Amino acid sequence: MIKAIIFDIGEVLLIEKNRKIENKLVKKFSLNRDRFRETKFKYLNKSLIRKKEDFWFEKKIAKKFELDPKEFINHWQELKKRNFKINKEILEIIQKLDKKRYLIWSLTDVNYSHDLIRKSLGVYDFFKSNIKSINLNTRKPLKKIYKILLKKLGHKPEEIVFIDDMKINLEVPKNFGVKTILFKNAAQLKKDLNKFGVKI
């Protein structure tokens, strides 16, 4: 019997349109796209486990391209504010599951700047608890973050469903005995939850 349902946030509950944002950022600051992506991914993983409240990730990129960090950060954050939006179909599913008394938590990799946008949108308010990489010095798909989740939940792995849009993030919890769903869209999510006896 399923008792807890854990949601990833980025590209599940929250539509982030990162490619569109990247295109606008590259155009605005006349950046080389390949070099920008390479630089971004160089610092991304470390930014996900930095608890310190600053724009370290964006500052590193700005420095690489010799940009004014304040202007760069402000523009990037403004693009996120305009392009990040809550997936209403998924929110409706979450709210229905909550009414059915399932324990609804989130498990998410997030850095400081994304965390600010999520807070401003009230994303975390839809969950009973939020397990964030920046608070734990670990991230998906490393075992440590899932062990922390299981310990905090206090339920048996087979009583838990974990939903994520990235297959690599499902491998460890699945090995622990957690039921997993690779997210594609709301209709598919309902069908997969139903297979585990969770009716919307």
Image (cartoon, rainbow, N blue to C red):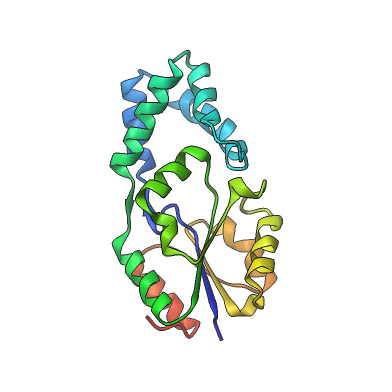
Q: Residue at x 54, y 82 (%)?
A: 2
Left/right placement of residue 23 relative to residue 98 reads left
Residue 80 x %, y %: 35, 39
Q: Residue at x 41, y 63 (%)?
A: 126
Q: Residue at x 50, y 82 (%)?
A: 196
Residue 32 x %, y %: 42, 21
- Pick the quarter of the image with the C terminus: bottom left
Instruction: Return the residue nearer the eye: 196 or 111.
Output: 111
User: From where the camera sits, is residue 84 visible?
Assistant: yes
Eyeballing the image, is 100 above or below 48? below
Residue 134 x %, y %: 59, 45
Q: Residue at x 31, y 22 (%)?
A: 28
User: From where the camera sits, is residue 38 visible?
Assistant: no
Eyeballing the image, is 66 above or below 198? above
- Pick the quarter of the image with the N terminus: bottom right
State which quadrant residue 186 falls in: bottom left
Instruction: Return the residue nearer the eye: 80 or 187.
Output: 80
